[in-house]
Image (cartoon, rainbow, N blue to C red):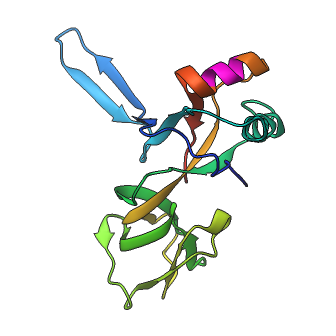
Amino acid sequence: MALYPETPIPQYPYDITEVWKTTVTTFDSGREQRRQKQVFPKYDIAFSYNTLTLTEFNLLWNFYHARRGAYGSFYVYLPDLEPAAWEGLGVGTGDGKTRIFDLPGKSTSSQKIYINGVKQVVTVQYSILIGGGQENSDRVQFVTAPAENEIITCDFAGYMRNRCRFANDKMTRTQFAHALYSTGLELKGLAMV
């Protein structure tokens, strides 16, 4: 999968919105019934830039064009000034065979791995592999493959990798430039696992 250009670096701070999906039914009594429709949040992002050279602008425009607007998905590493702490990120679902899974981040440290919410013991049940995953993400290698349908999550400090697509399917070069410099180029978060 493609990786959003890491240079030029967006203006800091950038907008990031955590998006959950909950169905809420309100009864005549005023009570509510809520159902969680997704286990992990999606992250919508808006990047803006102070100034760009024509070469940098064309790099971003060509990346948008190559994704065919909102059609193609890609990864983006959040350009934090320092590695941030992340909790409860989805890694994958066990199938009883796979032992190595990509973490949703790179340059990670202080990793904690969970299977169905139970913290695993490093070096006894798993080890961390630095790099080597999709778009150079770090990986976790289990001693024993997680069983079918077991949910693997993690906490870490590092640069989070987010799966996205462009929010807009139709943009002129002028609209694209306006988004880059003013409102922010909107990236729609997609499910990680």
Q: Which residue is at a point 47% across and 59% down the rendered structure image?
A: 159
Q: Residue 88 vs residue 177: left or right?
A: left
Q: Quadrant of residue 138?
A: bottom right
Q: Residue at x 78, y 17 (%)?
A: 172
Position of residue 131 measured from the top left corner of the image (x, y, whole percent)? 59, 75
Percent of width and height locating residue 177: 68, 23
- The residue depicted at 70 percent of the width and 17 percent of the height is 175
Decide if residue 171 is in sight here. Answer: no
Viewer-nearest residue: 94 or 71: 71
Q: Can residue 121 be seen here?
A: yes
In this view, 165 is above or below 134: above
Q: Is residue 30 above or below residue 120?
A: above
Q: Is 23 inside the magenta-drawn segment?
A: no
Residue stretch rendered in magenta on the structure: 175-179
* Residue ID at (49%, 69%): 107
Q: Quadrant of the N terminus?
A: bottom right
Per the picture, the main secondary structure of the magenta-coloured stretch is helix
